[in-house]
Amino acid sequence: DIDCVYEALLNTAIDVDSLEANSHLDEVWIKEVIKKAGMKLKWSKLKQERIRENKDAVRRPGTDPALLKPRSPVVTIMGHVDHGKTTLLDKLRETQVAAMEVGGITQHIGAFLVSLPSGEKITFLDTPGHAAFSAMRARGAQVTDIVVLVVAADDGVMKQTVESIQHAKDAEVPIILAINKCDKTDADPEKVKKELLAYDVVCEEYGGDVQAVHVSALTGDNLMALAEATIALAEILELKADPTGPVEGTVIESFTDKGRGPVTTAIIQRGTLRKGSILVAGKSWAKVRLMFDENGKILNEAYPSMPVGIIGWRDLPSAGDEILEVESEPRAREVIEWRKSEQKEEKGKDDLKIMEEKRKEHQEAHRKAREKYGSLHWRERSYIKYLERKEQRPLKPKEKVERQSNVLPIIIKGDVDGSVEAILNLLDTYDASHECELELVHFGLGDISENDVNFAETFDGVIYGFNVDAGSAIQQSAAQKGVKIKLHKIIYHLIEDLQEELSSRLPHTL
Ligand code: GDP
């Protein structure tokens, strides 16, 4: 019956607009998260907003073919969890750092360039997994030219392999197959190729056009062949861009650097970015003060396909936001003002109202579940305390029972778009035990705030922070309110912690 109760809970609707009003994150994540939470959403409003938003500063229409110059491919690595995406990225990055012999500190800018001995370059996006990819695409941002599909030769085609293939197909991005872990004794690369036939990924030896490279990300074996295959495919694709005229690009990540303020990393897609350029992205604008690459090296110019860190933003744009160059600061302000005023019309709800709404939604879900399934052993949540305070009376035991459930409400805060997304991605793999359901009540970027603590208190939730801090005042307030704040610097630790928390909340049936 518990299943049925969840079903009822999951039918709760959430007001996406109010969620967005409260965080920097874009609707795609919200959508994913809400999908994860199984909730329905009021979607159309936001979409309309986006469409309007982009009306005022627009991409240039078609370019004179004579102006087009070849550009490097931009590659996303996808594949099933544990098949070696991160290891592959690390190895590729390592090769690059070794080849460049620079003593610079590697900076995480969401993407990096690999130069081949031939002088050819490849840009790798370094958030593995398909969440980033689909998040961008859902916003109309197509950054990736080629998908490198990693399949472990000892494991074969798995669920996320198939999902990755689907994502690449939907985006009409060609695939190169990296059959990984070929160093293992039980590796069976041929089996992988055969399995993939069922998903319409046909390798060259089966008469198809998908190049397959046998690699070991661990030993670095054959990575050069993989890079060469990528270049060969890029040549066939005839990737070109116009390096002149106003700049266009896409935000890969954005975060606040303590010393430097808002930093955005982007892939340039058209034009050449220079110091002093005026850019707009989302609801923020920038006069480019400084540009740097993944080695922290200052850049004077950034060309199409180059990943670049940009400093000079007034606020934080979001991952997937389109970057457009405009002619002047007044023009940038005008565009942003326009975009903001459009947004304001749709909003105007403060956090308290959001919480109140959420609380009502919960009550409603519980009411429905009760109606349908009668009395159950719901677990107590401390928003009962909240209700008691609000109603200024203790709830009767019977009333309490009516408001209990087996849900672990969580709040996730991360340092950059990419990390929050990676966590959400991992949560996706959490197989609901049907005994305790995860419920993301709030998420965002930056250090833990009072607002997060309030959310957590209201929903008896736990705050998970990744690479962020919680100031001592916040810690104190959390302690007073009985809110747990858990800070981690390693995603897997965070997930493990979450799993422990979940099992501690399993129902204690009598
Ligand atoms: P991801 O989840 O796809 O990012 O996978 P990881 O890169 O984290 O790799 C998962 C595990 O597989 C790690 O323990 C890696 O050390 C291991 N691994 C990755 N590539 C190879 C490989 O080529 N050979 C072997 N033997 N192990 C590998």
Image (cartoon, rainbow, N blue to C red):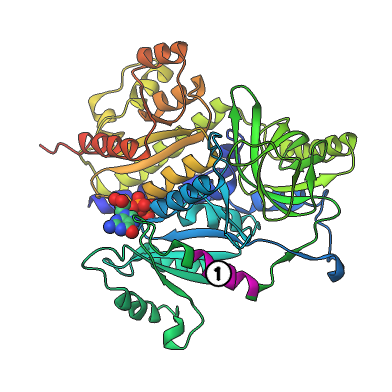
Q: Residues within 10 Å of mark 1 (few under 14, many from 20)?
A: few
Q: Is residue 134 visible?
A: yes
Residue at x 86% of width, y 37% of height: 334
| Residue drawn at the location 44% of the way across and 32% of the way down | 359
Residue that badge 1 annotates: 170
Q: Which range is magenta?
A: 226-235
**Mark 1 secondary-structure assignment:** helix
Main secondary-structure element of the magenta-colored stretch: helix
**Ligand 1 visible in quadrant:** bottom left
In the rendered view, does 245 fall on the left or right side of 260?
A: right
Looking at the image, can residue 7 be seen? no
Q: Is residue 296 left or right of residue 402?
A: right
Please check the rendered image and state whether residue 131 is part of the magenta-colored stretch, yes or no. no
Quadrant the C terminus occupies: top left
Residue 415 at what x, y percent from top left? 51, 32
Q: Between 426 and 378, which is closer to the camera in this rendering?
A: 426
Residue placed furthest toward the left: 510
Residue displayed at 35% across by 14% down: 479
